[in-house]
Amino acid sequence: MKRRSSGFTLVEVMIALAVLAIAVIGLIATYIWMTRQQAINAETTRATRAAEQAVEQIYGSTRFSEIFPRFNTIFNTAAGADDAGMLDYTTNPYGTATMGTFEVLTDGQIVFDAVPASTPLMFTRPGGVRVGRIEFPDGAVVANKMTLDETACAALGFSGAQCDINGNGVTTDTGLSSYIILPVVVTLTFESIDGTPRTVTYRKVLVSR
């Protein structure tokens, strides 16, 4: 009987190389996915921090009773209206939306005013609109001024005592012009690293100081 020679045959070597190639391809694909996921996570962290900073900036630099009139996203410049004398930065990202929208500069600075076209931004605008948006439980416009509506809280993700805006123990009041707490939602919509639009949402209930 003829004995088999020692060593590997060409077929065995080719099979081993094929298995190795599949393993290497798998490792490369996993590495690419992990790298991309890390970038997306970092992007999400930056966006969330920017939303937090926007709220901190509003809360820290504006009289509490003026936060809603100044930063709601309804633009009305009629006599006695909330936005009288203000520019509309929402319709034009570089000039004319209420203070309820903002941009994030590369250094993390939050800018509610107009931003020149040449200003480097942290996030890419999808469709040319401003990246950040401030939202409240808006109600009807009364005498050219936006009011608050407690029944609109649920649609923004708030519930229970978070919606008792005027502190009377009821969460169904509408047409409110004053408040002791103020639910606020900040959304950042931007073009992600993979070219698709992404939205990061941050919710906070502000309390009268």
Image (tube, grey):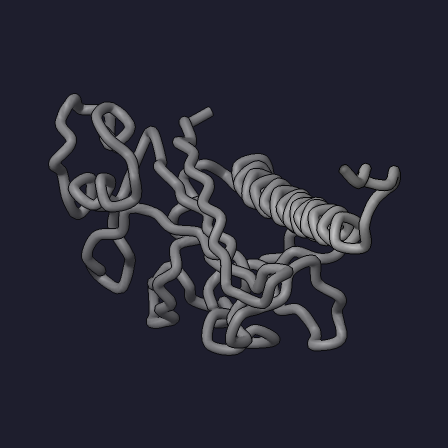
Looking at this view, is 137 or 24 the one in front? 24
Q: Residue furthest right?
A: 6
Question: Total marks drawn?
Answer: 0
Spot occupied by residue 5 in the image (x, y as percentages of width and height): 86, 41
Can residue 74 be seen from the camera position used here?
A: yes
Placement of 80 over or under 152, stated as above or below: below
Rendered image quadrant of residue 121: bottom right
Residue at (28, 58) in percent of width and height? 145
Spot occupied by residue 203 in the image (x, y as percentages of width and height): 42, 37
Residue at (26, 64) in percent of width and height? 144
Quadrant (top left, top right, bottom left, bottom right) of the N terminus: top right
Spot occupied by residue 9 in the image (x, y as percentages of width and height): 81, 49
Can residue 50 be seen from the camera position used here?
A: no
Q: Residue furthest front?
A: 1
In the rendered view, does 32 fall on the left or right side of 175?
Answer: right
Placement of 148 over or under 112, stated as above or below: above
Spot occupied by residue 105 in the image (x, y as percentages of width and height): 71, 57
In the rendered view, does 11 fall on the left or right side of 192?
Answer: right
Placement of 206 over or under 33, stated as above or below: above
Looking at this view, is 68 or 82 the one in front? 68
Residue at (35, 37) in percent of width and height? 183
Residue at (47, 68) in percent of width and height? 97
In the rendered view, does 72 fall on the left or right side of 176?
Answer: right
